[in-house]
Image: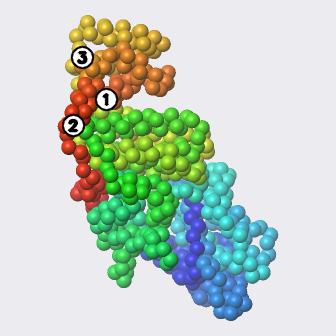
């Protein structure tokens, strides 16, 4: 059961909508199921003489009295509106049951506490099987305003109790960090225009993808505009600095032909200008991009940073952990953008799903996650996908997503835990699509038996507690090929196994040889490192520095259209 609290200032306008046909003629027999005074509330549609104006006047009675006391100045945002909807698949509720729901919601939110004769006036209107609309005017009979602080959260808490008592589907509790859901009007507009997502949803995803890739605030707005998105900034009256911004999707206009604007914080709490600034470096740092001599470095750096993030989640420092989860959300967008192949849609879906898991009521320490965010931004400008190294990175994301779900679950963050679990499933599907042919190829190119026996001895010597499970793992043969390649790249196999075997525990790994395979894959090529070092010492770089590009992966042609 989902409540959605909002406020406004047009009592009659909302009544017209509630008792009208709906924007798509979806309203069926609108009628009042409960009210502050069911006998005294005119019922348009049921009572022949009742009009919208009469009902608005009765609801606004205390508002009008207070307006006269204030010398004609009407109390601001005096209309309180809360649709309450059952989940898909829930049983049919009778009018009597919906009336009880309405009374409990207005009591829980302090709109009309039970037994309070001076409470606000309100009605609950049903015009569909699965929901009602509760509306109230928020001036009490004594002229005071009700205490509606955290009313949305209190309405949610009451709905969780109602679900349990009514035998309805139990939804996840929120913490007021979720983004606003598209309105029915926005969804209807998207359907009319043949689009699978609303303008609000599309703008949010574009904003996240761009913020993940750019190096500073100016680039953020520039790249958004390159995607055809209209940007409007709000300047402080004294300093002239940007203190807010709004976005409008291409072609999204109102009836007057004007752009429909969405403020950054209205798209998602962490897309406000202040939250963005916490995650974006300052201009000076962004003006000096790091020289990249090895095109595989961004992939390795990101993999290493994700492994480090896993450790932070276990550290007990919740602020640092939340900061790493926010940075991981950015990394998922950049991994999806830098990846090619049939598994890319799964990675993109994982990034979108993880958006709900990247923020919670725990305030994030973004500085603690600088290394992960920096590595992820390098990856956004990577020139190519380096085969097995990319799969090693995806493999690392699978395990961090599962750890994120567990971290949120332990702290009672139900919606975030569910979102992280959904991201995990997408990442796991993407990993399996990408890894299967590569592991099969490694198995096909296994070294000769004598070499495999030597590697078996190395495993038993360095990882005796895990040796039997590693050697029995179906991916052991693929691991021997990876060990042989690492040896060719300048690694000592025994020393390498000891190093990667202690990076994290192996006891919980279902396929320990597979885990070791991707840990080894992510190790740098020692011979290449030595060559680069010699080249740098001699004064001749091995390759030119990677310039700071003017476009980001978010601006790729195939991702510019809002039409899905």
**Which of 197/451 is in front?**
451
Q: Residues within 10 Å of mark 3 (few under 14, many from 20)?
A: some
Tell me which label, 3 or 1, sits earlier in the chain.
3
**Which of 254/70 is in front?**
70
Q: Residues within 10 Å of mark 2 (few under 14, many from 20)?
A: few
Instruction: Assign a secondary structure to mark 1.
Output: loop
* Mark identifier at residue 539: 2
- CB under 8 Å between discs 3 and 1: no
- The residue that mark 1 highlights is 524
* Mark identifier at residue 341: none
Kindly tell me whether residue 176 is visible in this rendering.
Answer: yes
Viewport quadrant of the C terminus: bottom left
User: Would you identify the image quadrant in which residue 19 lies?
Assistant: bottom right
- CB under 8 Å between discs 3 and 2: no
From mark 3 to mark 1, how far is it between C-alphas? 21 Å
User: Disc 3 or disc 1, which is closer to the eye?
Assistant: 1
Which residue is rendered at x = 50% and y = 48% of the image?
Answer: 367
Residue 490 x %, y %: 27, 20
User: Would you identify the image quadrant in which residue 153 lies?
Assistant: bottom right
Which residue is rendered at x = 32% and y = 64% of the image?
Answer: 222
User: Disc 3 or disc 2, which is closer to the eye?
Assistant: 2
- CB under 8 Å between discs 2 and 1: no
Residue 78 appears left or right of 202: right
* Mark identifier at residue 446: 3
Tell me which label, 2 or 1, sits earlier in the chain.
1
Q: Residues within 10 Å of mark 1 (few under 14, many from 20)?
A: some
User: Disc 2 or disc 1, which is closer to the eye?
Assistant: 2
Viewport quadrant of the N terminus: bottom right
From mark 2 to mark 1, how far is it between C-alphas? 22 Å
């Amino acid at each position: 059961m989902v409540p959605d609290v909002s406020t406004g200032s047009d009592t009659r306008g909302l009544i017209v909508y509630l008792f009208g046909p709906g924007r798509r003629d979806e309203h069926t027999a609108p009628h009042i199921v409960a009210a502050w005074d069911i006998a005294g509330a005119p019922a348009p549609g049921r009572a022949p003489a009742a009009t919208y104006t009469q009902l608005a006047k009765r609801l606004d009675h205390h508002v009008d009295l207070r307006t006269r006391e204030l010398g004609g100045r009407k109390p601001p945002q005096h209309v309180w509106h809360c649709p309450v909807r059952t989940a898909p698949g829930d049983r049919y509720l009778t009018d009597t049951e919906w009336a009880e729901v309405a009374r409990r919601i207005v009591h829980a939110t302090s709109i009309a506490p039970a037994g309070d004769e001076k409470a606000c006036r309100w009605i609950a209107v049903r015009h569909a099987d699965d929901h009602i609309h509760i509306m109230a005017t928020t001036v009490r009979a004594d002229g005071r305003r009700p205490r509606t602080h955290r009313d949305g959260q209190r309405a949610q808490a009451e709905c969780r109790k109602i679900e349990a008592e009514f035998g309805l589907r139990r939804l996840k509790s929120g913490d007021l960090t979720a983004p606003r859901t598209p309105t029915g009007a926005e969804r209807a507009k998207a359907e009319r225009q043949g689009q699978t997502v609303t303008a609000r949803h599309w703008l949010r995803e574009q904003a996240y993808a761009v913020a993940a890739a750019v190096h500073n605030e100016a680039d953020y707005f520039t790249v958004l505009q390159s995607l055809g998105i209209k940007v409007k900034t709000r300047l402080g009256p004294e300093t002239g600095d940007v203190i807010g911004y709004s976005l409008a999707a291409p072609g999204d206009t109102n009836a007057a032909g004007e752009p429909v604007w969405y403020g950054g914080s209205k798209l998602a709490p962490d897309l406000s200008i202040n939250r963005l600034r916490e995650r974006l470096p300052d201009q000076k740092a962004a003006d000096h991009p790091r020289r990249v001599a090895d095109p595989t470095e961004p992939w390795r750096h990101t993999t290493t940073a994700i492994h480090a993030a896993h450790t932070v989640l276990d550290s007990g420092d919740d602020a640092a952990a939340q900061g790493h989860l926010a940075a991981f959300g950015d990394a998922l967008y950049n991994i999806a953008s830098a990846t090619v192949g049939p598994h890319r849609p799964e990675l993109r879906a994982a990034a979108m799903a993880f958006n709900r898991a990247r923020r919670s009521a725990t305030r994030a320490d973004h500085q603690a996650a600088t290394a992960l965010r920096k590595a992820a931004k390098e990856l956004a400008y990577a020139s190519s996908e380096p085969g097995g190294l990319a799969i090693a990175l995806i493999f690392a994301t699978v395990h961090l997503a599962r750890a994120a779900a567990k971290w949120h679950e332990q702290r009672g963050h139900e919606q975030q835990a569910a979102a992280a679990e959904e991201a995990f499933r997408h990442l796991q599907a993407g990993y399996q699509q990408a890894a299967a042919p590569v592991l099969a190829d490694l198995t096909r190119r296994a070294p000769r038996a004598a070499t495999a026996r030597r590697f078996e001895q190395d495993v038993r010597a360095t990882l005796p507690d895990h040796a039997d499970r590693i050697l029995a793992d179906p991916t052991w043969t693929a691991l021997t090929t990876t060990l042989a390649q690492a040896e060719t790249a300048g690694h000592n196999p025994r020393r390498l196994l000891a190093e990667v075997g202690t990076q994290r525990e192996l006891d919980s790994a279902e396929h320990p040889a597979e885990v070791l395979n991707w840990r080894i894959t992510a190790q740098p090529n020692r011979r290449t490192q030595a060559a680069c070092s010699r080249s740098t010492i001699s004064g001749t770089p091995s390759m030119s520095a990677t310039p700071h590009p003017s476009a980001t992966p978010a601006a790729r042609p195939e991702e510019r259209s809002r039409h899905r």
